[in-house]
Image (cartoon, grey):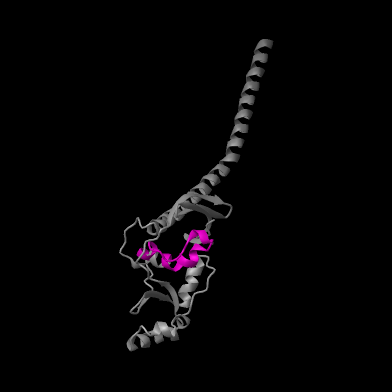
């Protein structure tokens, strides 16, 4: 009888131990599960933003490297020499922001022609929209200041009257259309990574057999990509 009671106590003890062990394991699993789920959600969001940034940057660089064919005039201009050089430590977007915006979002800014040149013009509202997406340090030239006496001498009377309408409505020079010489700088996107609340893109620019590098800071807000200054060193 005594042995039976002793065995009974042992069985009860084993059952209690197994129950406690199972309960502890359950608590650990349930405690950690929400953390793991949140990490997966964060990683998923990071991957989505990086994919979004990568697709846009690859498209832009493809036009700059004139490896992507297009019928859009602004995109063709991206592949031409417009005077930017990575060795000058200037802000890339001071030169390219309006052209990029006209290209990838097909803005169709107003084109003005004379006997000697063609260029696109934009309103102050359009400038502000460009500055919302690209960090620009230069000031846009008003059409009134751009149209010197020498410049106006290349226009007909009809064209001058049309230009006066743009001047009166405060238009600015967006960019000149230069399609003669191809861009000699070749660009390469190396990687994109998350850095706190923003993203960083490592970009190379090869000019005259010399490689310049830059780290471009990027913010994504409501699926809208916003770029900081891009300066090569």
Does any portion of residue 1 appear in the rendered image? no
Q: Quadrant of residue 207?
A: bottom left
In reply to whether residue 178 is colored magenta, the answer given is no
The answer to whether residue 192 is left or right of residue 184 is right
Report the residue at 52% width, 73% height from top: 139
Vertical comparison of 149 with 72: above or below: below
Start-end of magenta stretch: 75-100
The residue shown at (31%, 58%) is 69
State the image quarter where residue 74 is shown. bottom left
Q: Nearer the viewer, residue 40 or 123?
A: 123
Work out which residue is located at the far left of the displayed protein and give it: 71
Q: Is residue 60 above or below residue 38?
A: below
Q: Give the farthest residue toward the right.
A: 2
Give percent across and percent down for residue 76: 35, 64
- Name the magenta segment's main secondary structure: helix
Q: Which of 118 and 123 is in front in this view?
A: 118
Q: Where is residue 68 in the image (x, y as percent from the top left)?
A: 34, 57
Q: In which quarter of the image is the C terminus?
A: bottom right
Which of the 4 quarters of the picture holds residue 174? bottom left
């Amino acid at each position: 009888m005594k042995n039976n009671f002793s065995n009974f106590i042992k069985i009860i003890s084993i059952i209690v131990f197994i129950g406690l062990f199972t309960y502890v394991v359950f608590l650990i699993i349930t405690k950690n599960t929400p953390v793991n789920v949140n990490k997966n959600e964060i990683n998923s969001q990071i991957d989505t933003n990086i994919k979004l940034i990568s697709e846009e940057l690859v498209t832009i660089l493809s036009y700059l490297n004139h490896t992507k064919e297009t019928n859009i005039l602004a995109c063709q201009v991206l592949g031409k020499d417009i005077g930017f050089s990575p060795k000058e430590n200037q802000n890339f977007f001071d030169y390219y922001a309006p052209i990029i915006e006209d290209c990838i979002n097909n803005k169709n800014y107003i084109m003005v022609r004379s006997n000697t040149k063609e260029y696109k013009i934009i309103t102050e509202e359009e400038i502000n929209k460009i500055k919302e997406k690209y960090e620009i340090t230069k000031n846009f030239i008003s059409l009134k200041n751009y149209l010197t006496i020498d410049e106006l001498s290349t226009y007909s009377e009809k064209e001058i009257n049309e230009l006066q309408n743009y001047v009166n409505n405060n238009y600015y020079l967006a960019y000149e259309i230069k399609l003669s010489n191809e861009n000699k700088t070749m660009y390469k996107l190396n990687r994109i990574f998350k850095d706190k609340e923003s993203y960083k893109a490592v970009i190379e620019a090869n000019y005259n057999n010399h490689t310049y590098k830059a780290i471009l800071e990027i913010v994504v807000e409501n699926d809208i990509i916003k770029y900081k200054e891009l300066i090569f060193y």
